Amino acid sequence: MANPNEKDAAVVEKQVALSDDGTSLSQVSLSEGVGKDYELKCALINKCMQEEIGFGRYQWQLFALTGLGWLADNLWLQGLAVVLPQVEQELNPSRIEYAVLAEFAGLIVGATTWGVLADIIGRKLSFNATLFICGLFGLASGGAPNFVTFSSLIACMGFGVGGKQSSRALYLEHIPQSHQWTLTLLSVWWALGQLVASLISWVFIVNFSCDTSIPAGQCPRSQNMGWRYTMFTLGAMTLLMFVCRYFIFDLQESPKYLVAQGRDEEAIKVLEHVARRNGKTITLKIDDLRRISDGPSKPATSVKETIRSSFSEMSLSHVKPLFSSRRLAINTTLIIIIWGLIGIAYPLYNAYLPLYLEARGSASGSSSLDETYRNYAIVSVLGIPGSFMACAVVDFTRGTGKWTIGGRKFSLAVFTMLSGLFMFLFTTSKTLSAVLGYSCASGLTQNAMYGILYAYTPEAFAAPHRGTGDALCSALNRIGGFIAPLIKIATTPTNGSPSANAANSPVFVSAALFMVSAILTLLLPIETAGKTAL
């Protein structure tokens, strides 16, 4: 065992090495609530990632596979939205919103479970298992004989897709600081998910659905297979994504998670593997990590052993560090509240957009399914540029100290406020063209907003507690999504179909919540732009 003087000398040596570029260790740190030994080891890993491994073949493949999780999330959120009118026409539920309630009930449980598990048993298992569960139950929902069965299967599907936050943690922990902006770019997959869902539904629902004039409950299954074909297709696509993740890509566990668990040898092996995939070599050795903390690295353990030991010691050890200082407590609390408010606002508008478009179309004399889903596809396409807009501004800052303008927080506030503004304008529109125009503008700014939010949130938490922090945010976001259908039920007619006038009420609530979220964003005390994630 190294004596205290040798250990202190090693720590000083590493701090000097980390300051070669003029950046002190305190500036490297983005968060608190982690031990000094972990902080030093993480800084060495970040330096290795930035200067030796870089952003290469492994990261681009991981970017694509992580993006599939983003795509699947919105694929099912919007996929359910686009089939709601036909599900209602055939299965005749008392309120079609109950299907959305079921989805978000599953998402709440999934977000909490998978997020906490990511910190307990690692990112890798959650990364792979979530898409399998989502695809399996999503596929099965297409064969549901009644509305109760359909909603139950949708809830199980939501449990799977709710674990997306583990994938963004895994991705962030495999990339150098110079490329953390690509976490924002992942939102382009989110927009593609909406586009794919709208295009698939446009093909199937327009060609294999009952006429809209047929009353609910009188539409036979044989003439209304469009929504079922849509669910079958989305389910098969999601299972194919799982195959790509699990069987094709050689996924590695997060080195920062391994170091946090005391498994330094495994962390070095992961870094060496990633470097080889990128055609590089690394100089970081196990001895470099061992000199920082006394004692040998913990041996590798199986998934079964990890689960058993983790649950036997499970406590609030991953929650308390998120509130370990006043500054961190304020930031954690605010970001959780922001996620909750957006969780209500986003589905309150987007999950029912096809119904709103159909209602507005009827009011303007144009009620064909083809036009409704064509317009929905247009809105989806115009959301894609929002990702690139977000990438262009997230690292753009001006000024110094507390008066700095730009970066993650300011950009997030601007796009969130614009989303609310365009929704307010949506409620004033009198023609289908105006509705479509404001919907497109709102779709673009919302995608930019989500891109920045998805990047900022994991960056604001340290790796040992990142999964738990993300889980709290995602869980409240999904709870908000659960509340959204209740608001719609309270503000629309009892038959569940929004009239042209009643459709304005939930959209107005959504717009107001986006405005409040924008104001809270400006109050966040932590800015992550230009800083390396712990």
Image (spheres, helix red, strand yellow):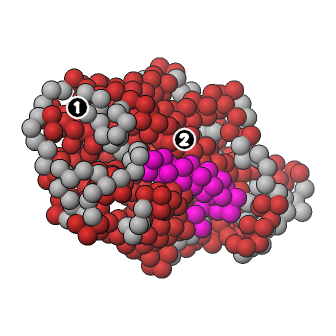
Which residue sits at x=65%, y=32%? 328
**Marker disc for residue 426:** none
On whether residue 109 falls in the magenta region, the answer is yes
Which residue sits at x=42%, y=35%? 489
Residue 59 visible in the shown view: no
Nearest to the observer: residue 178 or residue 414: 414
Against 62, is 487 above or below? above
- The secondary structure that dominates the magenta segment is helix
Specify the quadrant that holds the N terminus: bottom right
Query: x%, y% of residue 91?
Result: 36, 57
Query: x%, y% of residue 388?
Result: 29, 46
Query: x%, y% of residue 31?
Result: 63, 39
Nearest to the observer: residue 131 or residue 246: 131
Which residue sits at x=17%, y=59%? 206
Mark 2 is surrounded, within 10 Å at the Cα level, by few (under 14), some (14 to 19) or many (20 or more) other residues, namely many
Q: CA distance from mark 1 to mark 2?
A: 28 Å
Q: Seen from this angle, which residue lies furthest front? A: 218
Kind of residue sitting beneath label 1:
Ala
On whether residue 462 falls in the magenta region, the answer is no
Quarter where residue 334 is shown = top right
Against 142, is 74 above or below? above
**Marker disc for residue 479:** 2
Mark 1 is surrounded, within 10 Å at the Cα level, by few (under 14), some (14 to 19) or many (20 or more) other residues, namely some
Under circle 2, the secondary element is helix
Nearest to the observer: residue 11 or residue 385: 385
* Magenta stretch, residue numbers: 98-127
